[in-house]
Image (tube, rainbow, N blue to C red):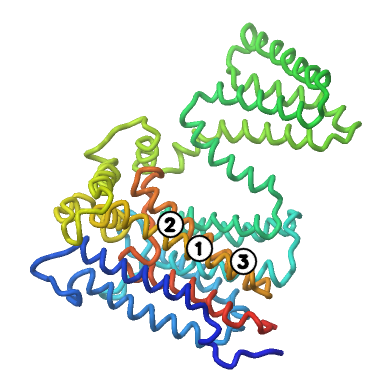
Amino acid sequence: MKRTVNIWNGIDKTAIVLFLLLIIMGWINIYAAVFNEEHAGLLDFSQRYGKQFIWIVASLVLAVFIVIIDNRFYFFFSWFIYGTCMLLLVLVVIFGKEINGAKSWFEFGSISLQPSELAKFGTALALASYLNTRRQDLTRLSAIIPASAIIIFPAFLTLLQPDMGSAIVYFSLFLVLFREGMSPYIFVSGLLMVVLFFLTLLTNNLYLTIALIIIAVILIWFATRKWKLTLFGTSIFLLITGIIYLLDQYVFKSIGNELVIFISLILSGAVYGFYVYNKRAVSVLIIYLFLVGSIMYVNSVDYAFNSFLKPHQKERIDILLGFKTDFHGTGYNVNQSIISIGSGGFTGKGFLQGTQTKFKFVPKQSSDFIFCTVGEEWGFLGSGIVIGIYLFLLLRLISLAERQRSDFARIYGYCVVSILFSHIFLNIGMAIGLVPVIGIPLPFLSYGGSSLWGFTILLFIFLRLDASRTEYLI
C-alpha cells in the first residue's frame, strides 16, 4: 500500500490559492459594504469586517486541522457525521433562535451557528459513502430511492425551519447521481418539473395541457415513425374527449375542461395500451406515462404554490415573473441590487466610493447581496474577475474529481462542485434579478462564520482526499 510521506506536497496548491483569493476579496468587500468612518480599522472587532477576520483565521486553522486528519477518517465516519448533522437540524427546529421568521440558528452568547450550512458536507459524505460502499447501480430504483432519501431528508428538515434557499441547494446533489449513472430520463424529468412549474404560473393550465399533448403526439411519431398509428391514437383520444365533453355539458355539468381532457387521456391510453403490449413499444409507454405525470403535476402546481409557499415567497416569484412590480416592498432588494450593479459601469466607482453601498440602499449587502458591492465598486470588470475565479475553481475541482482512484473521493468531489455551483448561481442570479430572493450566501465572500466554515470544511475534505489519491481508503 502506497503512503504519502508529506501530505502538504500532495495537496492542490491551485485550489488553495483560489480559496485564499476569494476569502480576501470577500473580507475587503464586507469592509466596503459596512464601512463606518468612526470605525475605519480593518481589525475593529465591533464591526462585521472585524468579526469576519476572526472567522477567516478560524477557517484557516480549521483547514489545517482537516488536512492533518487521516483521509480514512472521512470515509469511516461519514455516516456518523451525517447523523450528527441531521440531529442538529432537528434540534434547531425545536430549540433554535427565530430570526426573520426562521428557526435556523443556535445562539451561544454572541456566536451563532447555522446547522444547515454544516449539514451540506455531512450529506455529501453520506452520499459518497453510500454510492461507493455498495457499488450502487443507479439505473435501478432500488439504488436511486435510498440515494434520493439521503438528499431529501436534510432538505425536508431545512424546509421545516423554514429555509427555502438552503433546502434548494441540497437538490443540486442530484447532479451527482446523474454523473454516477442515473438514467437521463429521471434527470431530464427533474429539470422539466422546474420548467413546468414556471410555465404553469405563466400560462393557463388548459393551454399548457393541450401543448403537452401535442408534444407527446409528435414524440410518439418520432419514436415509431408510423404516421397512421399516431393518427389512429390521436383520433381515439379526440373521439373519447368529444364524448366526455358532451356528457359534461348536458349531463354532469361539473367536470370542467381540464378534467375532461385528463379522463379522456386515461381512457384512450387504456385502448392504446393494447398496441403497446403487443408490440412491446416501450418508448410509447414512457412518453404516455410522462404525459400523464406532467399533466398531473401541472394541475397540482397551483395547489402547492398556494399551500406550501409563504406569502413573501409567492410575492417574490410573482415579481420575478413580472406579475407584480413592487419597488418599495418585496421587490425593493432586487431593484436596488440591480441599480447598484448597473451603476458600477465597466470599471466601477472605486473602493469605498459606491453611493448605493455607502448609503445602505441594499439590505443584507454584506451577506446575501455582497455581489452588489462588487458590481458597484469594481464594475463589470471586477464582477467578471470574481465570476472567473469561481469558474476556474469549479473547473479545477472537476479536474481533481476525475483523477481520483477512489469512487468515494470522486463522488464527494462532484458533491462539492454541485453545492458550490448552486450557491454561486443562485446568489448571483438573485442579485441581478434572474432568480427569486431566497437568501443564500455567496461562497467565501458573504459575511458569516457558519457559511465560511461550512464551505471551508466542504472544500478541504476533498482537497485532503485528493492529496492521498494514491492511497487506499480501505
How crowded pointer 2 is (Cα within 10 Å; few <14, some 14-19, many 20+) is rated as some
Amino acid at pointer 2: Ile
Spatial CA distance of label 3 from label 1 is 20 Å
Label 1: which residue?
Answer: 394
Cα gap from disc 3 to disc 2, whole angstroms: 22 Å
Task: Report which quarter residue 166 is drawn in.
Answer: bottom left
- 95 vs 398, left or right, is left
- Which label's residue is closer to the chain start, 3 or 2? 3
Q: Is residue 284 above or below residue 35?
A: above
Which numbered marker is on residue 232? Answer: none
Q: Residue at x 87, y 27 (%)?
A: 275
Q: Nearer the viewer, mark 3 or mark 2?
A: 2
- Residue corresponding to mark 2: 424
Q: Position of residue 373 (x, y in %)?
A: 26, 56
> In this view of the protein, which residue sits in the foreground, 289 or 321?
321
**CB within 8 Å, label 2 to label 1:** yes
Q: Secondary structure at mark 1?
A: helix
Q: Residue at x 56, y 25 (%)?
A: 208
What is the quadrant of the N terminus in the image? bottom right
- Earlier along the polypeptide chain: callout 3 or callout 1? 3
On the picture, is 103 further left or further right than 301? left
- Outermost residue toward the left? 38
Say if 202 sits above or below 334 in the image.
above
The residue depicted at 61 percent of the width and 8 percent of the height is 249
Tag 3 secondary structure: helix
Label at residue 127: 3
Q: Among all residues in the image, which is located at the extreme bottom?
A: 5
